[in-house]
Amino acid sequence: VAAINGLADTIVGIGAMFSAFIGGYLWDINPSLPIFVAGLANLSTLPFILYLKYRKRRYSK
């Protein structure tokens, strides 16, 4: 569990390093674009979350 947690924290840290540069680039294109892209990124996780919810309900019976 500790190794997986460390890997996840490393991935988040690397993503956080580049997020300011990506956000700044998107802001230069259009100031509302970083918010739009972040919303799309959040919505892209919805199918995975629904799959996990369905799977949990299916196997918990």
Image (spheres, rainbow, N blue to C red):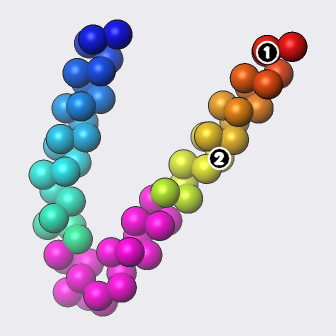
Q: Position of residue 22 (x, y in %)?
A: 21, 67
- Residue 45 lies left or right of residue 1; in this view the side is right
Instruction: Choose mark 1 or mark 2, whichever is in front.
Output: 1
Q: Which residue is at 23% across, 71% downward?
A: 23
User: Disc 2 marks which residue?
Assistant: 47
Magenta span includes 55: no
- CA gap between label 1 and label 2 equals 18 Å
Number of residue marks: 2
How busy is the neighbourhood of tag 2: few (under 14 within 10 Å), some, or many (20 plus)?
few
- Residue 17 lies left or right of residue 34; in this view the side is left
User: Disc 1 marks which residue?
Assistant: 59
Q: Position of residue 51 (x, y in %)?
A: 69, 36
* Residue type at the position of mark 2: Pro
For label 2, the SS is: helix
Residue 12 sits above or below residue 35 on the image:
above
Magenta stretch in the rendered image = 24-41
* Residue type at the position of mark 1: Tyr
Q: Which residue is at 38% across, 75% downward?
A: 35
Q: Position of residue 57 (x, y in %)?
A: 79, 25
Residue 34 sits above or below residue 56 on the image:
below
Q: Position of residue 13 (x, y in %)?
A: 18, 41
How busy is the neighbourhood of tag 1: few (under 14 within 10 Å), some, or many (20 plus)?
few
Magenta span includes 33: yes
Q: Which residue is at 82% across, 22% downward?
A: 58
Instruction: Give the mark, 1 or 2, whose residue is nearer the N terminus.
Output: 2
Q: Which residue is at 79% across, 15% downward?
A: 59
- Residue 30 lies left or right of residue 40; in this view the side is left
Residue 49 sits above or below residue 34 on the image:
above
- Residue 57 lies left or right of residue 3; in this view the side is right
**Quadrant that contains the N terminus:** top left
Residue 21 sits above or below residue 5 on the image:
below
